[in-house]
Amino acid sequence: MPEVRVVNLTKKFGNIVALDNVNLVIHDKEYFSLLGPSGCGKTTLLRLIAGLIEPDSGEIYIGGKRVDNVPPEDREIGFVFQTFALFPHMTVWENVNYGPRVKNFDLKAAGTIGHEVLELVKLHERLNAYPNELSGGMMQRIAVARALAAGAKTLLLDEPLGQLDAKVRNEIRYEMRRMAKDLNLTAIHVTHDQAEAMSISDRIAVMKKGKIVQVGTPQELYMKPNSLFVAYFIGESNFLEGSVVEAKDSELVIELRGGDKVKVFGEGLKKGERAVVVVRPEVFMVEQKKQGENVLKGTVEKISFEGTFVRYEIKLRSEDSVVVIRPSLTEKWFEVGAGITLSFEPEKAHVFPYPETSLAEELSV
Amino acid sequence: MSAKKPLKYTMYLAAVAVFFALILLPPIIGIFIKWNTIEEVLGQPALMHRALIAVVNSFVIALFVSALDVVAGVPLAWLITRGKSKWLNVLDTFADIPFIVPTAALGYSLLLFWNGPEGLSALFGGSLISTGWLLVALLHFTFSYPIVVRVFVGALLDYKREYEQASRTLGAPPFIAARTVTFPILKPALIAAFILSFARSLSETGATFIVAGAFENGPVFLQNMRNAFSNGLVSQATYEGATIFASLILIVTSLSIFALIRILGSRLRLPFNRVWPSIERKLSYTKATASRNTVTLLVFLAIVLLPSLFVALPAFQALFTEHFSAAISGSGLWTDYWQSLLISYLLGAIVTVIGLIVGLPMAILIARKKFGGFIATVLDLLINVPLIVPSIALGVSLKFFWQSFAFMPEFILLIFAHLAITYPYIVRSISAAFERISVDIEDAARTLGAKPFDVFRTIMLPLTKYSILSGAIMVFTRSVSETGATLAVVTNLQTAPVVIVNWVRALQNPALNANITPSVVGLGCGILIVFSFIILLLLRLITRGKGRY
């Protein structure tokens, strides 16, 4: 039931446009992430949905009901703050029972719910502890339990893992998804960590400067980024500048800086236009083709060993650098200074028109 | 490094020594010097009874007024910090006005407003509120109300709104959220506000004396005894005995009340266990908030702001009389006035400078726990003593102490008295500022090669200068408006508030000085207020938003 929909939503803080005419539908029971660099408006959007701030214009619907003028306490949402905001003067039990109490639930029912949610987050034995006696991970789970106990059908999570250390973070993120799925909740999860968003979300909205750039499943965003920014923000990419020298339907030949020519597929580019070719580091093949199309020659400049992979920084003839990632155990390593020949399949690269401002500006957060 | 360590510790030890020698011990010793005169009072049951009644009155009024302050002041603080109108900034400034008007002028202003024929009473044909306990209570409400507002505005600005937002998203309407989450978390600020206004009400003398009439609370009783002695109505022994008796009860009772509040305060749970969702929901939204805000603003305007500024009326009228030119040229009784003003501001400046010098090392010592946590806590408690001891009692005991040094000029005595009263303000504000700054920053500067003094000069001083400045200005204004201890200490010297008090007394009793007319007093108060206003303005300019860390 709780589908969340925002229509033409705009919010300004003074002269700063935090959210610029945003439209978005989040389906019922979906685990949805709002992803973007800090200052992109993702937290503003979440707070608007929660009713913690008021929009300048636009509409917000939760479960088909328009809620812009409904105070947060009547929106049937649960909000988990980055700092958890557990009430310091109440015990775990009082925190968890707060929602049922202020919503005037029947006391017995409230008690049952309290025990259920604490069982769910496996913290039943810490009932009488005060928040300052708990670890970060525990506080996070209590914050979720508290939101659930209040009967939330929509869970709004504002960087809920941001305060936790890396190990705990990785454990808890799957737990959060599992819990949301088990309880049939709609969850909206704000994060700046693309790996986190990719690993737990059904769908992700990538945001930049108050606007939504692309909405899609993690695979769609990774395989078919609709912009240089998404290609840059999701995963890792190499950006090669050049201009279109041949254009036949969607088949393009791009002459890169330094003179190499590559074939790629892309729409909307005409002959003579400047373009940026995007190639992910794992797309490059090494020493497979010596010449022909999409072959780039260069020198290994830097090697770093990352466990599963070896990462090379390679300087091309054009003086551009590209990053190439290869498996570390099944292939022979290259030495620094060694010549290397790279190639890639046209279908696996992306091409975008050169941005109106500059590449650096377009990728800047 | 090791060679400098002793030097550093010498500085801190000196600060502690100064504190004990100049501020904490003299009033205590002063009382014991005159210990034997208490017998004098014990032999006069009627006088003892009168003293006891006066002290009880003090506490009843202080308790009643402080409770009322919290009830009336918290909604205004809420409105100032949470409201959306741009006028709230103006309101915020207005809320400081009674704070900055010297209490003696405030007392006269209230007297005019509630009691004088020119004031509100004109509408009712006769004086609306006669001098006495009700007017004293109103007066105390007026000057302590801004303290509560100021403390609570600060607390609300520092408060992490997320707690309240969390409560809202869990289903609590605003009223329940405030009552069950915000207020319990801000309880320390509520207690601090209560204590400050309580202490202020206990010690205020000048203005209370003006509006008290025949009514006596502790400070007024002490002042009456003093006047009776100087008019030859009671013997020196009776005067001293009664003074020591009343001061001792005042001090002991207020210290025990504060100890009680400190102990019980942290255990006290605000009534939050039950909620009444349907009723409290009604209190949360538009209609209820609008009427609450209206009542809050009305109380503020009618009981606090208007009466405080009412003295401007006769002051303004006086601009067109011969008094104004007399005042400007400084002739007649104005010679004394300008002299007293000069003394007040000179005294304020000297006290501020000395206070900074002796207070700074103490503040650092407390904030950085230089001699360990236990000593820091003990010192932290001790520096508050002058704050909660009624200032007139402090003045009296200081006088008894320093009297034994016959060579002590009165002005020096005044400096000591004002230093003792303002010391907690300066130490408090600086140590709070230091505590807010992480030790890591100091350590970072040290690892980059700065010597301890360089760290202080280049890192801590720039980061805390606004707190130090506002502390200094607080000391200055407090010193300039101080009346109780000043009256107790001086015999010949007159500070500006003392002159105002004397003038008002002459107004009430023309036999004392027939030259004093309402427009003279109005003008005198007006000039004092204008000067104080300029200081308030400076304070605002200096501590405004930017540059606060």
Image (tube, helix red, strand yellow):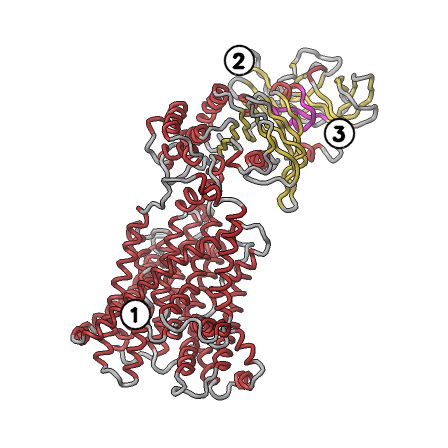
Count of marks overlaid on the render: 3
Question: How far is mark 1 from mark 3, CA to CA?
Answer: 81 Å
Q: Where does the N terminus of chain A fall, quadrant-wise?
A: top right
Write down the chain letter for disc 3: A
Question: How far is mark 2 from mark 3, CA to CA?
Answer: 38 Å
Write down the chain letter for disc 2: A
Numbered range of the magenta stretch: A224-240
Residue B255: x percent and y percent?
28, 60
Look at the picture and state if B306 lies above or below B83. Answer: below
Residue at 51%, 62% (x, y): give it.
Answer: B301
Look at the picture and state if B427 lies above or below B269. Answer: below
Q: Nearer the viewer, residue A116 or A41?
A: A116
Amino acid type of the residue tagged 1 in the rendering: Ala
Residue at 53%, 77% (x, y): give it.
Answer: B315
Please tell me the numbered disc located at residue B407.
Answer: none
Q: Nearer the viewer, residue A26 or B534?
A: A26
Mark 3, residue position: A354
Mark 1, residue position: B393
Q: Nearer the viewer, mark 1 or mark 3?
A: 1
